[in-house]
Amino acid sequence: MQAIEAKLTTDRTVRLGTVTVGGSRPILIAGPCAVEPDYVEAAGRLAALGVDVLRGCVFKPRTRPESFQGMGEAGLELVARARSLTGLPVVTEVLTAEEIPLVAEVADCLQVGSRNMQNFRLLVAAGESGLPVLLKRGFSATYDEWLASAAYIEQTGNRQVILCERGIRTFETRTRNTLDLSAVPVMRELTDLPIIVDPSHAAGTAAWVPALASAALAVGADGLMIEAHPRPRESWCDPDQALSLEELQPIAGWVLAAAPIRGLAG
């Protein structure tokens, strides 16, 4: 399995449109947890802050059935408009293989979420799409299990895989999950795949996200994935962990300044 063979001499890079993941500087992926009717407006403001890639999820796997499940196909038009307006690449989650052809028309990268990390048919279908795949770590998955899931994508011939650490389940309940920052240096030894960090889903509380984001950059992450919303308290999905755009702005600056740190940690 390619993803768990000895690490190559040169780290792999993945292209999302004009953006390079795993290059000389980390990247910032940001946006609302889920696409909402004002998504295009939000995307324009995120682009003005210097965000590299937009989050644009229209299909949402939620713990509780009564929670907002995403706008579905109706949200894809908003994603397409935001992508056209800003010129930024978009990453969006797929829950089933049947959704991939629809999403592939408007997205630059497919996200396989934590709950689907070991949905092997979905992994193969995502790989066969030819699009880059952002693979989130399952909240109870070991490093080897995570890499084995990446190998399912790679065995299709698609080597454009990005790993995303988003926190794991532990005995601690104050935070939504426990961010495993060890994953970044360990994965750098085990694989050449780029690895980014999602501090929003780890923290579950917006006030703690900046500190975790800073720590992720310090250990050498190739990027951050952060939930941000023009009016966080009005977010239809996970309002407690979403940053305002004003709170996101300094983090965008940290990302630009983090290249020397990443060079030391990488």
Image (tube, rainbow, N blue to C red):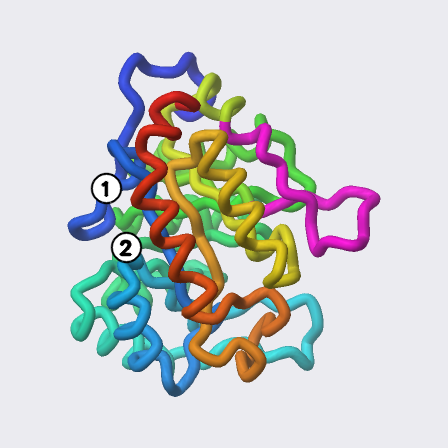
Task: Residue at 38%, 68% (x, y): give it.
Answer: 56
Please give the range of residues in magenta: 166-184
Marks 1 and 2 in Cβ contact (< 8 Å): no
Q: Residues within 10 Å of mark 2 (few under 14, many from 20)?
A: many
- CA distance for labels 1 and 2: 9 Å
Question: Where is the N terminus found, in terms of image quarters?
Answer: top left
41 above or below 192? below
Q: Amino acid at mark 1?
A: Thr
Q: Position of 4 compared to 142: left or right?
A: left
Question: Disc 1 or 2, which lies upstream in sequence?
Answer: 1
Question: In the drawing, what numbered circle is on residue 20?
Answer: 1
Which amino acid is tagged 2? Asp
Which residue in the structure is indicated by mark 2? 52
Task: Label 2, secondary structure: give it.
Answer: loop
Residue at point 53%, 69% (across, down): 60
Q: Is residue 123 visible?
A: yes
Image depth: mark 1 or mark 2 in front: 2
